[in-house]
Amino acid sequence: MRIGFFTVCLANLSFKEVVEWTAKTGFRALEIDSYPDSKHVDPCKLDKDKIRQIMDLVQKHDISISDLSYSPNNLDPDEEKRKEHHIRLRRMIEACSELSVPTITTFAGKNPNLGMEENLGFFQQEFGPIVDYAKDHNVKIAIENCPMGFALYGGENMAYSPKIWKEMFKMFGPTLGLCFDPSHLLWLQIDYLQAVRDFMDRIYIVHAKDCEIDRRLLGQVGILDSEWVDVLFTGKSGIGHRQIKWKDPSKQWWRYRIPGLGEIDFKRLISELLLRGYNSPLIIEHEDPIWYGTEELNKEGLTIGLRHLSQFLP
């Protein structure tokens, strides 16, 4: 199992700079930021020369590309936006095939004007052609389990719980699976180890993101006191995550952390994954409020995470 990270936290660096730092630091895998403004891999701007440059660079440094990542609201009620997202997903699938990358990571999405049963039907309708396209290209689709908004208030990604995953996987075969992130399950009060046991055959990418709960504050405000501006938990604007201005994480009763600095038991998590045959990379998705905000801080945070995870692997 290789350890890597999601490149969005080094968004200001070129792909070459990211790969060289990755190899020098000891990481061996990358989840690639593939949004329209990405400096890393923009699937809509690839040609044969660019593809060859990317493949030569990662092969030279012995770096695996675990997946290309683009996670909009794929069930946006605005039909034009939805079509734009789906066109890009198809191009990402083509790019994965061209780059010999096995997986794309994205969100299921959610139409906030529909109930959950209606959203599941909408998901089946909208994702059917995309799943077929991925199957034709021998590429898997990994749906991340981040609610993208406080779940009780209808966040923009419905795929946040095992109950919903079961319904999604009834619709489609093994082309569709999970980008499994235990940190979201922790603050949602869901057993992340049991989720691994129950869904191992559909876990294609694992995000190594930790989470901590401020129980003193939780006891004062309750679970409904949870503001969300996309990824507010980082508390800063700056490099990565497209200059979004975030709220103060000290006022949030839960926040994301670098592996080893929160409450996720990565020793047990990795053991459960290995026991069940997981052999894809373990990807640090860095959104820790302490070790985030500048290139230097982001790299230090990633290095702390690598050090913690490495003790559980050869």
Image: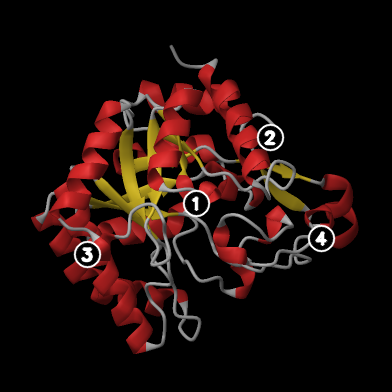
Q: Position of residue 101 (x, y in %)?
A: 23, 44
**Disc with the residue nearer the chain's start (1 vs 2):** 1
Quadrant of image for the C terminus? top left
Indicate the amino acid at tag 4.
Gly
- Identify residue for label 1: 8
Quadrant of image for the N terminus? top left
Res 273 quadrant in image: top left
Q: Counting other residues with Cα less than 10 Å from the Cα at mark 2, is it few (<14), some (14-19), or many (20 or more)?
A: some
Mark 1 vs mark 3, CA separation in Å: 19 Å
Indicate the amino acid at tag 1.
Val
Q: Which mark is residue 263?
A: 2
* Tag 1–tag 3 contact (CB < 8 Å): no
Mark 4 vs mark 1, CA separation in Å: 32 Å
- Identify residue for label 4: 222
Indicate the amino acid at tag 2.
Glu
Res 62 quadrant in image: top left
Q: Which mark is residue 91?
A: 3
